[in-house]
Image (cartoon, helix red, strand yellow):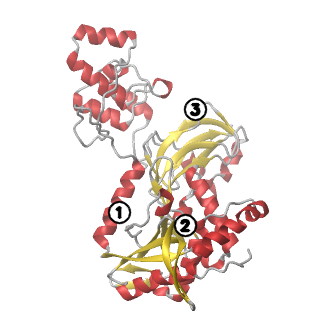
C-alpha cells in the first residue's frame, strides 16, 4: 500500500502558517477525492483543506490548535495504490530522495526535530503521574491543569462533555471550583458516577489567572477573529492620523430607479441588486477622478496603486467582521459588481472565503446604514488610507431648488462619512473625494438601462 503525504497548501502570498481548528476526518476513516480533511484558520480567514486523493486516513501529524507551516506534512493517507506511486508525491516531485520519504514524521511538526511517539513512551514510565494519556487535551486545558497541580491521571478521571467525551475548559474549571467546595470523598464519588458539575463563568486564556465571577457579571474571552480585529483596529489608530469628513446626499433618483428595475433585474440575472454595488460604482468613478486617494504608505514613501480593489466590510452571523475584496472593480460594470458583491457576501456568511479573497484591497466601503445608522466615523483598514461609511437612507423634508424658485419636498437623503489618513490625505482631497461620490449618486439617471 502506498502512503500519500498530505501537505498544508499555500493559501495566499502573505500566508505562511495556519492554525488547525478541527479535524473532520479521524484515523481509520475512508476519504474520497476533495473530501474535507480539516478546518484551518489563518490571520486572514478560515478555510478547509480537501484531500487530493482517495484512501484511508492513517495518521494525523498535528492536533487541534497546533500551528502548521505552509508546505508541512499534516496527514498520512493510505491510497491503496502501488508503492511506486510515492514517487509522484510532492516531495518526490521536488527531487527529495525516497530515503527521506521513509523517515518517520514528527508528532507536532515543530522545526522537524521532535521525539517520536516510541521515544516518548520509553522515557515515561507507565503508571506514573506524568504518563502520556491516551485522552486528548487541548493546550489550554493542559495549561490550566499544570497551574492547578492536576496530574494526567486526575485529568483522566474528570468527565468530559465535549465531542466524543473530550474534556473542555468548562469541565475542568467547574471541576476545580467544586474541588475546593467538596470533600475528597465527594470528589471521588462525583468522578466515578460521571456527573458533570455545573459550569461557571471563566476567563478563557492560558496567560491569565482563572477566576469565577460573582454578582451576575460574565467574562467572555475574545475568540480568535475578534482578537485579530481588535489588534488591527488599535494598530490603525496608532499608525494613521484619522480625520473624518461628512456629506449629505440626495439619492431620491437612485432610490426610485432601483425600485423600478429590481424585480426585472433579479428575474433576468438571478441576483438581487442592493444599494451596495451602486455605492461601489460611484466610489470607483471618484477614485478614477482623484487617484491619490487610492494609495498606501510605506515609511516616507507613497505607493500609488494601479488597480482599484474595493474592500467590502461584511458582518458575520457571529457578530465579527470580515472584509472581502472586489479585485479590479474598475473593470466591472454594475452587473459584474453586483454579482461580485453577492458572491463575496454569501461566501463570507457561510465561512467559505479563501485567503486571497480578503487580500489586496486599496479602498474600503462599509455600509453602516444596514444597521439603521445615519453616519459613522470608521477606522481606516490598513495599509489603505481611506474608508467610506454610507449611512441609512431616510426620507426628509428638504429644500429643492428650481429655476422657478425653491420649495420644500420629501426627499431620500443619506450621509457619507469618509475617514482618511491625514499624513498623506489633506482635507481638500478628502473633502473633495467624498463630495465627488455624493455628486455621482445625486446625478443618477432615472432612465439608465442595466
Q: Position of residue 137 (x, y in %)?
A: 39, 31
**SS for tag 3?**
loop
Residue situated in front as seen by the camera: 360 or 53: 360
Quadrant into which the N terminus falls: top right
Left or right position of 54 against 388: right
Residue 233 numbered tag: 1
Residue displayed at 23% across by 33% down:
211
Q: Position of residue 182 (x, y in %)?
A: 23, 14
Query: Can residue 358 be seen?
Result: yes
Of the two numbered discs 3 and 1 on the same chain, state the one appearing first in sequence.
Answer: 3
Left or right position of 444 against 298: right
Residue 27 numbered tag: 3
Left or right position of 20 against 190: right
Question: Is 119 rendered above or below residue 418?
Answer: above
Q: What residue occupies the far right of the structure in this picture?
A: 268
Residue situated in front as seen by the camera: 221 or 427: 427
Tag nearer the camera, 3 or 1: 1
Question: Is 381 rendered above or below residue 109?
Answer: below
Marks 3 and 2, how far apart in space?
A: 37 Å
Tag nearer the camera, 3 or 2: 2
**SS for tag 2?**
strand
Query: What residue would you read off at disc 2?
Result: 325
Amino acid at each position: 500500500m502506498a502512503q500519500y503525504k498530505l501537505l498544508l497548501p499555500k493559501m495566499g502570498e502573505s500566508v505562511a502558517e495556519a492554525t488547525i481548528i478541527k479535524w473532520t476526518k479521524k484515523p481509520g476513516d475512508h476519504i474520497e477525492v476533495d473530501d474535507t480533511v480539516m478546518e484551518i484558520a489563518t490571520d486572514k480567514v478560515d478555510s478547509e483543506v480537501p484531500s487530493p486523493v482517495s484512501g484511508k486516513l492513517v495518521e494525523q501529524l498535528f492536533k487541534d490548535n497546533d500551528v502548521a507551516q505552509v508546505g508541512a506534512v499534516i496527514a498520512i493517507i493510505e491510497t491503496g495504490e502501488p508503492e511506486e506511486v510515492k514517487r509522484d508525491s510532492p516531495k518526490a516531485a521536488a527531487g527529495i530522495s525516497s530515503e527521506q520519504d521513509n523517515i518517520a514524521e514528527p508528532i507536532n511538526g515543530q522545526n522537524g526535530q521532535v521525539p517520536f511517539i516510541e521515544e516518548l513512551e520509553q522515557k515515561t514510565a507507565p503508571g506514573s503521574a506524568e504518563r502520556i494519556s491516551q485522552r486528548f487535551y487541548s493546550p489550554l486545558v493542559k495549561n490550566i491543569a499544570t497551574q492547578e497541580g492536576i496530574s494526567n491521571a486526575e485529568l483522566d478521571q474528570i468527565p468530559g462533555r465535549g465531542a466524543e467525551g473530550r474534556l473542555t475548559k468548562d469541565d475542568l474549571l467547574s471541576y476545580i471550583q467544586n474541588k475546593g467546595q467538596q470533600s475528597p470523598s465527594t470528589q471521588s464519588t462525583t468522578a466515578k458516577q460521571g456527573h458533570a458539575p455545573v459550569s461557571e463563568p471563566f476567563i478563557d486564556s492560558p496567560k491569565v489567572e482563572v477566576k469565577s465571577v460573582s454578582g451576575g457579571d460574565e467574562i467572555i474571552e475574545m475568540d480568535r477573529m475578534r482578537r485579530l480585529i481588535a489588534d488591527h483596529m488599535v494598530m490603525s489608530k496608532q499608525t494613521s492620523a484619522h480625520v473624518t469628513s461628512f456629506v449629505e446626499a440626495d439619492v431620491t433618483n437612485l432610490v426610485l430607479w432601483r425600485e423600478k428595475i429590481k424585480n426585472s433585474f433579479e428575474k433576468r440575472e438571478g441576483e438581487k441588486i442592493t444599494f451596495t454595488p451602486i455605492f461601489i460604482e460611484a466610489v470607483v468613478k471618484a477614485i478614477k477622478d482623484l487617484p491619490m486617494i487610492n494609495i498606501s504608505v510605506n515609511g516616507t514613501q507613497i505607493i500609488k496603486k494601479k488597480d482599484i480593489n474595493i474592500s467590502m466590510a461584511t458582518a458575520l452571523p457571529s457578530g465579527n467582521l470580515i472584509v472581502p475584496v472586489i479585485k479590479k472593480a474598475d473593470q466591472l460594470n454594475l452587473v459584474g459588481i453586483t454579482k461580485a458583491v453577492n458572491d463575496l457576501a454569501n461566501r463570507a456568511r457561510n465561512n467559505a472565503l479563501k485567503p486571497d479573497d480578503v487580500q489586496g484591497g486599496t479602498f474600503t466601503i462599509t455600509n453602516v446604514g444596514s444597521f439603521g445608522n445615519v453616519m459613522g466615523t470608521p477606522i481606516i483598514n490598513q495599509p489603505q488610507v481611506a474608508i467610506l461609511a454610507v449611512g441609512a437612507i431616510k426620507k426628509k423634508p428638504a429644500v429643492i431648488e428650481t429655476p422657478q424658485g425653491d420649495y420644500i419636498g420629501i426627499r431620500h437623503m443619506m450621509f457619507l462619512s469618509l475617514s482618511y489618513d491625514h499624513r498623506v490625505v489633506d482635507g481638500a482631497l478628502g473633502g473633495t473625494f467624498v463630495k465627488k461620490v455624493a455628486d455621482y449618486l445625486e446625478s443618477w439617471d432615472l432612465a439608465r438601462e442595466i
